[in-house]
Amino acid sequence: LLEVAGYEIWTAFIGLVEGLVEILLVLLLVTSFDVTLVDLAYLSLVVGAVFFIGNVGFTTYKRWTRPYIHGMVGTFALKNRTALSVMVKTAVPLSVGALLANGEWEIL
């Protein structure tokens, strides 16, 4: 949402910071401890969750999401039959295409 609402610089910045923090933590853990891939997956989940909660908190504090919050959580989109129909008509061919592309790579 933030990319199309005029806050793309913030989104790029926080994404960069999150990536750098995760890389540094992975480097620290790999060089200091005997970690497994599962440990690194947990680290990635924790870093992602912390940055998600921080980003939601910051954007709420700055009131950047205020104009959009009713549409995001205040409506039940499945009642809108026209929008649901358009979404299904768009998603089905894309899903079939993705399934065929993935199947092709699996065969190769």
Image (cartoon, helix red, strand yellow):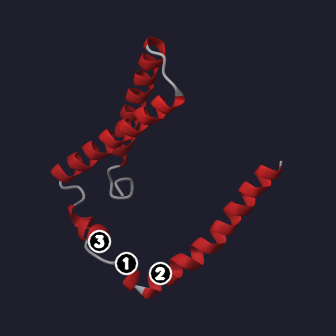
- Report the residue at 43% width, 19% height from top: 29
| Residue corresponding to mark 2 | 84
Please report contact status of discs 1 and 2: CB closer than 8 Å, yes or no: yes
Q: Mark 1 = which residue?
A: 77
Inter-mark Cα distance, 2 to 3: 15 Å
Q: Residue furthest top?
A: 32
* Residue occupying the point 77% across, 50% down: 106
* Other-residue count near label 3 (Cα within 10 Å), few / some / many at <14 / 14–19 / ≥20: few
Does residue 81 sit above or below 1 in this rendering?
Answer: below
In what element is the residue under mark 2?
helix
Q: Position of residue 100 (x, y in %)?
A: 74, 62
Residue 107 placement (x, y as % from top left): 82, 52
Q: Kindly state the secondary structure of the residue where label 1 is placed.
A: helix
Residue type, label 1: Ala
Q: Determine the image quadrant of residue 94.
A: bottom right
Q: Position of residue 101 (x, y in %)?
A: 73, 57
Q: CA distance from mark 1 to mark 2?
A: 8 Å
For the residue pair 36 and 65, the one nearer the viewer reads as 36
Residue sitting at the far bottom: 81
Q: Evaluate whether residue 10 shows in this view.
A: yes
Mark 1 to mark 3: distance in Å?
Answer: 9 Å
- Residue drawn at 20 percent across, 62 percent down: 66
* Residue that carries the numbered disc 3 in the rendered image: 71
Left or right: residue 19 compared with residue 7 = right
